[in-house]
């Protein structure tokens, strides 16, 4: 099974990339591919409980959460990016099932995947 990591670094506010990464991920389960999502830089804003991308015409988070739960999609976020955007762990919606990783562990994570796509 091939492993593909979608790394998103743009904010979900005013951008479609967090939304599009999850659309791509959920479409890959029909293939022999194990996808995951890494949120870095401004994309970590999507983890905040107060983010409402559906107000921008994007995929509602309830739909995203449903598929994350159904498929066991791995979602990673970089701790230092959360700190930079002043998002505390208690501000993260638990339905993301996000695994927080340190910047120093990024190279190891990236090398676990056959392909890394940046949005």
Image: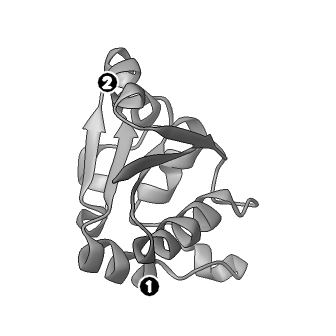
Looking at the image, which residue sits at the far right? 14
Looking at the image, which residue sits at the far top? 104
Disc 1 secondary structure class: helix
Name the spot of residue 76 as percent of width and height, x first. Answer: 35, 45
Image position of 59 (left or right of 30): right
Q: Which residue is mark 2?
A: 102
Q: Quadrant of the N terminus?
A: bottom left
Give me the residue at 48% from left, 29% from top.
84
Tell me if label 2 and label 1 are in contact, CB under 8 Å. no
Give me the residue at 40% from left, 73% from top.
29
Q: Tell me which colouring the rendered structure shows.
A: one colour
Q: Nearer the viewer, residue 81 or 6?
A: 6
Q: Which residue is mark 1?
A: 63
Q: Nearer the viewer, residue 52 or 113?
A: 113
Give me the residue at 51% from left, 51% from top.
45
User: Crowding at label 1, few (<14), some or many (≥20) Cα neighbours within 10 Å?
Assistant: few
Q: Quadrant of residue 74?
A: bottom left
Name the spot of residue 25 as percent of width and height, x first. Answer: 49, 65
Give me the residue at 46% from left, 32% from top.
81
Disc 2 secondary structure class: loop
- Going from N to C along the chain, the mark reached first, 2 or 1, is 1
User: Crowding at label 2, few (<14), some or many (≥20) Cα neighbours within 10 Å?
Assistant: few
Name the spot of residue 39 as percent of width and height, x first. Answer: 48, 45
Looking at the image, residue 1 lies above or below residue 38: below
Q: What distance separates the C-alpha of mark 2 from that of mark 1?
A: 28 Å
Q: Quadrant of residue 58?
A: bottom right
Name the spot of residue 75 as percent of width and height, x first. Answer: 35, 53
Q: How many numbered discs sit on the rendered protein? A: 2
On residue 9, the disc is none
């Amino acid at each position: 099974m091939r492993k593909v990591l979608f790394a998103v670094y743009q904010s979900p506010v005013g951008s479609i990339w967090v939304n599009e990464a999850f659309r791509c991920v959920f479409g890959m389960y029909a293939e022999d591919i194990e996808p995951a999502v890494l949120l870095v830089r401004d994309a970590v804003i999507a983890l905040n409980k107060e983010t409402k991308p559906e107000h921008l015409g994007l995929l509602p988070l309830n739909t995203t959460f449903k598929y994350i739960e159904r498929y066991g999609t791995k979602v990673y976020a970089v701790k230092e990016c959360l700190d930079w955007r002043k998002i505390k762990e208690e501000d993260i919606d638990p339905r993301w099932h996000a695994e927080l990783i340190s910047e120093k562990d990024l190279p190891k994570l990236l090398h676990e995947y056959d392909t890394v796509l940046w949005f």
